[in-house]
Image (tube, rainbow, N blue to C red):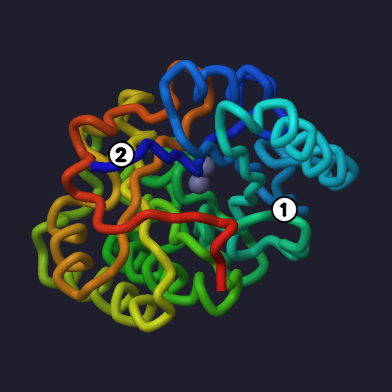
Amino acid sequence: MSALRDYHMHTCFCDGKSDMESMVVSAVEKGLECVGIAVHSYTWFDESYCISRENIPRFISLAGEMKEKYAERIRVFCGVEQDIYSEESTEGFDYVIGSVHYLKIADRFLPVDEDAPTQRSIIREVFDGDAMGMVRSYFDTVGEVYERTHCDIVGHFDLVTKFIEKDPAFDTASDGYLRSWKEAADRLLPSKALFEINTGAISRGYRSGPYPSEDIISYLSGQGAGLILSSDAHSPDDIAYGFGTYGHLATAEFDPSAKH
Ligand SMILES: [Zn+2]
Ligand SMILES: [Zn+2]
């Protein structure tokens, strides 16, 4: 792996634990060449984890201050993790991570990654116990993430498996599961959006490996997709988490200043 770059991390503008400058300073200390501070886009249907609408200009201008202040030591970028159902513009941000955090069923927005009991109750109550139905609904939505967000990076492609190791609610070795994710991958591949190899569920103790799973990573790289590492860090210590271990899986580098 070449120079260290991490474009997926959060601050207390959304659900992160630290302020922006502490994240930048930690990235400098860890020897990163580029750091991207991302914020969860505003979602009107769930304000518990995202930036408030009023704070969006402040986030962008503070990132601008960080760019200047640390210009000699690190390149700072300002990103947004755009939820597929967010209605906010992504203008003003250097790059976009497109992510699916909810299933939209009728008029309800159901969280994919809240916790295992919530996922179980969605399967039971909304999908009549059909776990694979929930999985299909998730990957159908992921398949649309580029069209809807015009993202540079597809966020945590198989987030639906966040709890699978501790609470296996469905079988990831089944044909149904394979078909679901392949369809989503095949819809996204022509966009040339990068896929992230996200180590955030490892650092937070949910999974023993990154998103996406090994199978998906090898399919994506076999199809020529660009894969980059990201930490989804919510605290300074977790920046670039596991990059030494998983660096060999990356197939691309991202530079928001060189965007088409
Ligand atoms: Zn996310
Ligand atoms: Zn994130």
Whether 26 is drawn above or below 10: the answer is above
- Asked if residue 177 can be seen in this view, the reply is no
Q: Amino acid at mark 1?
A: Thr
SS at badge 1: loop
- The tag earlier along the polypeptide, 2 or 1, is 1
Disc 2 within 8 angstroms of ligand 1 (CB): no
Disc 1 crowd rating (10 Å Cα; few below 14, some 14-19, many 20+) is many
Residue positioned 30% across, 47% down in the render: 211
Is 53 placed left or right of 210 in the picture? right
Q: Position of residue 146 (x, y in %)?
A: 51, 73
Is 179 placed left or right of 35 in the picture? left
- Mark 2–mark 1 Cα distance, whole angstroms, equals 23 Å
Q: Quadrant of the N terminus?
A: top left
Whether 209 is drawn above or below 197: the answer is above
Is 59 placed left or right of 80 in the picture? right
Disc 2 crowd rating (10 Å Cα; few below 14, some 14-19, many 20+) is some
Q: Position of residue 174 (x, y in %)?
A: 11, 64
Residue positioned 52% across, 18% down in the render: 26
- Front residue of 216/117: it is 216
The residue pinned by badge 1 equals 43
Residue positioned 31% across, 58% down in the render: 252
